[in-house]
Amino acid sequence: MIVPFGESGAGSELYLPQRRHPAGGPGDVWEAATGELAGALFASLTRRDQRQKGEQYLRGLLQARGRKSIRNIAAHVGGPAAEQSLHHFISSSTWDWMPMREALARHLARTAAPQAWVVGPMPIPKAGDQSVGVEQGFDQCQGQSFHGQQAFGVFYASELLTVPVHWRLFLPGSWLRDDLRRRRAEIPEGIAEETLPDCAVAAFTESVGSWRVPARPVVLNTYVDRVAATVDRFTAAGLPVVARVSGTSRLEVRDPALPGYGGGPLAAQRILASVKGLRRRSTWGGPTGAGGSLTVAVRVGPADGSGRARRPGSGDGDRDRDLLLLGEWVDPDSSPVALWVTNLASAPAGALLRLTKLAGRACRDLTGVGEEVGLRDFEGRSFRGWHRHISLASAAHAVTAMAGVGGSPAEYPAPRSA
């Protein structure tokens, strides 16, 4: 079923997929989902023994109880004899995880087209300092510091399920500038330092942005610091984007009927405070409206790197087109709980709100299904081993989701600034 999203252009429609279940009981559903996905997923592995080990590891992630270490997985699929071979398959083999991830995304899209591709953070707490990328970080969802790894996932997202299809591990400069650390962790040449927001954007552009999958709006569920540069990057590629921003982000009111017009760059929080009287109730969570919030959307323009507004006709061409600033309130007397900027300048506020709720669902599933299948459980030290484990854990996440994990989107704490 297709629900009108906006007016015309890429991403102007929301696709609501219809879930398909194989006939039979729960065990049949689980087995069918595993077998069907494994056939698509491991086609890129040229060697038969690699395909066998891939399916063995996938089934171990689904069956093992507790932490999904290689030892624990091997105990459920072959005992001590399997541990060494699975360790080699994950940590030392030569297979490329990117074709497997694209195969996962295409398999999900063939089942039902996504409504959006969500990019969101995943903190991975670690006790030691040997795992690749470990450093002191900030958990945006919990609003607290932690010691460990930080990664960004790209999720196939709909109102029925979310599944991670790609991952990018954030590598701090302390790792990239240390030759010994780089060598021990087998970090490939060519990986350079980047900010967390740049890592989030790159997670999409290096994967789904070039894959043979449906073009859908991209929801960036991490605070974007350089609003103009980030939105421009997606606009130039012809992609709709909805990006989370902080209350201090500087924007220019572009609607002459609203307060602040012509006043130059203003903080997003101040812009929304001046239009609180225009808020309307929007529902989300499916046709029955499982939840509701107050929303308002304001036509704005970005500021350049100096904080100055970029005026229409300044020579920047398409980069000067209007954006929308979306604010969401749960308590009408408090500050907004979420602020977003989008290049979908003609989209209704309610439709945009429903898109952003897909990011909340992805966060919820990370702490639910993601924990069950071991997304955070890799105990090795290498860059390649981490990527291979999390690729297969994402496939296990897909099996679990397709086999019956459902429900409506749930509220999740909004990311908080460090």
Image (tube, rainbow, N blue to C red):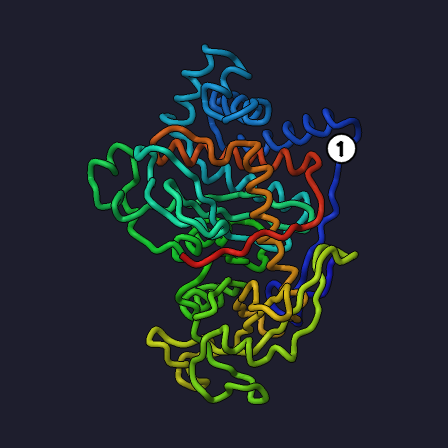
For label 1, the crowd category at 10 Å Cα-Cα, with few meaning under 14, some 14 to 19 and many 20 or more, is few
Along the line of sight, which residue is nearer the eye, 120 or 276? 276
- Drawn side of residue 309 relative to residue 26, left or right: left
Q: Position of residue 182 (x, y in %)?
A: 25, 38
Q: Amino acid at mark 1?
A: Pro
Along the line of sight, which residue is nearer the eye, 21 or 66? 66
Does residue 38 lie above or below 199 as drawn?
A: above
Toward which corner of the image does residue 126 lie, by quadrant?
top left
Residue denoted by label 1: 22
Does residue 140 lie above or below 67 as drawn?
A: below
- The residue positioned 62% from the left and 56% from the top of the image is 357
SS for tag 1?
loop
Q: Position of residue 386 (x, y in %)?
A: 41, 34
- Drawn side of residue 325 relative to residue 8, left or right: left
Q: Residue furthest front?
A: 333
- The residue positioned 64% from the left and 34% from the top of the image is 400
- The residue positioned 27% from the left and 43% from the top of the image is 175
- Drawn side of residue 348 relative to residue 359, left or right: right
Does residue 315 lie above or below 142 as drawn?
A: below
